[in-house]
Amino acid sequence: MLAGVILTHWAHGDTVRDLGLGPSELIPSARLILPLMLVFLIPMLAYGFARHLLVWTAMTGRAFQYFISYGAWCAAQQYLTQSYFHHRLMTVIGNRHLSSALIAVMFAAAHLPNAILMAVTFVAAFMFSEVFARHRNIWPLALAQTVGGFLVAAISPPALIHNMRVGPGYFFYGLQ
């Protein structure tokens, strides 16, 4: 599938800049997404610390490895969501707000049947898509998704979010 996606980029003459993969628009994208994310991250941090779900501790090598691995997965998701689907939808639809809303619906649907993740990803995907439509760069979005995803996982009861599982794995959570 990845080869097919890359071939479509080549067939359409997409550039690294079009896809938001280079350094272009990095700073403007970060400046726009950071305040938006703080609106969500600060209350999540406050809740996590108040409920003792989060604690100050030194980052271990294993935690750092999980963070980097999850960050790579988030970058892959942002690439497919923004650089492929949103880039194409904006070309076809022409209305960036409508294409952002459609992307949000698609990204939330990819998290079926996990209702908590569907709600969170709908809001995040709409914000990320609006930022991408203005400033083509996926890297600040991937970082924001990584941090936000870690916080959602840390402060949500595992039984409620099934340890972030989606699809068939959601139904098999907790079975040994």
Image (spheres, rainbow, N blue to C red):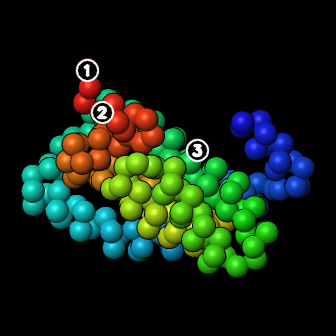
SS class, disc 3? helix
Mark 3 Cα within 10 Å, few/some/many (few <14, many 20+)?
some
Q: Tell me, yes or no, if residue 37 can be seen here.
A: yes
Q: Is residue 32 left or right of residue 67?
A: right
Tell me which corner region of the image, top left, top right, bottom left or bottom right, holds residue 85. bottom right
Of circles 3 and 1, the one toward us is: 1
- Residue at label 2? 173
Say whether marks 2 and 1 touch (CB < 8 Å): no
- Residue at label 1? 176
In this view, the residue farthest toward the left is 51
Q: Is residue 128 left or right of residue 157?
A: right
Say whether marks 2 and 3 touch (CB < 8 Å): no
- Residue at label 3? 76
In front here: 81 or 18?
A: 81
Q: For marks 2 and 3, give the CA distance.
A: 24 Å
Q: Which residue shows up at 29% across the image and 41% down it?
A: 162
Of circles 2 and 3, the one toward us is: 2
* Amino acid under disc 1: Gln
* Amino acid under disc 2: Tyr
Q: Which residue shows up at 30% across the image and 40% down it?
A: 163
Looking at the image, is mark 3 or mark 1 earlier in the sequence? 3
